[in-house]
Image: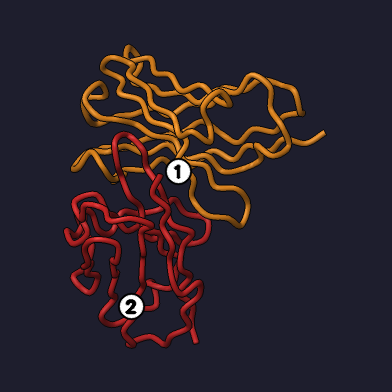
Amino acid sequence: EVQLVQSGAEVKKPGESLKISCKGSGYSFTNYWIGWVRQMPGKGLEWMGIIYPGDSDTRYSPSFQGQVTISADKSISTAYLQWRSLKASDTAMYYCAMTMVTYDAFDIWGQGTMVTVSS
Amino acid sequence: EIVLTQSPGTLSLSPGERATLSCRASQSISSSYLAWYQQKPGQAPRLLIYGASSRATGIPDRFSGSGSGTDFTLTISRLEPEDFAVYYCQHYGRFLFTFGPGTKVDIK
């Protein structure tokens, strides 16, 4: 079964760093793009960026460029989303999702990681 | 940058009724790159339609997508209780993904 399993919920203070993960299984991890999507409480979906684990080619939404870092470790089939200095406005659910059947839509989603940033 | 607008914001219908959801792009887009998702409370989104009209794996045939240019439509032919949810359209273009703001389909 193809699946993406994300790391657990996080509670952090403003200014702290954080790296959340998304582990792929049941398919060839290096061959499909994985993206990250933010959903702030009660709000819609926002695409943050995408990575091709095969060569780590990474593209960012202009809205998130410089705010987060997306990476992948193909040796352990895991993609990451990282912040250097969290803000309260980073409080959100974060989903990883992959494009498998078609490269332009996300057909497999992780279960989401809730990140809460509060002093 | 493509901006997607969805209407209505909320659609109140009864089970068995037909739902018609609209997604409008700020400029003409290829229908190959227009997708629809369903999201229920507390769940991750689920891909329904890609390429404007192709159903994703396991999606019932009561869901259909159509449209071209700037105007796209998701139709649910007969609403089942499990279809009450939020629906998002999404465009892909040159490594940029854009989501619409969503349409909530709730029970009348």
Snapshot colouring: by chain
Cα gap from disc 1 to disc 2, whole angstroms: 28 Å
User: Pointer 2 indicates a residue of which chain?
Assistant: B
Question: Disc 1 marks which amino acid?
Answer: Gln
Q: Can I make out residue B62 in this image?
A: yes
User: Pointer 1 indicates a residue of which chain?
Assistant: A
Q: Which mark is residue B20?
A: 2
Question: Disc 2 marks which amino acid?
Answer: Thr
Give the drawing colour for chain A.
orange
- Which chain is the one coloured red? B
Residue at screen point 66% across, 40% down:
A91
Q: Nearer the viewer, mark 1 or mark 2?
A: 2
Q: Position of residue B94 (x, y in %)?
A: 29, 36
Closer to us: A73 or B25 = B25
At numbered mark 2, what does the secondary structure look like: helix, strand or loop?
strand
- Residue carrying label 1: A111
Closer to us: A50 or A66 = A66
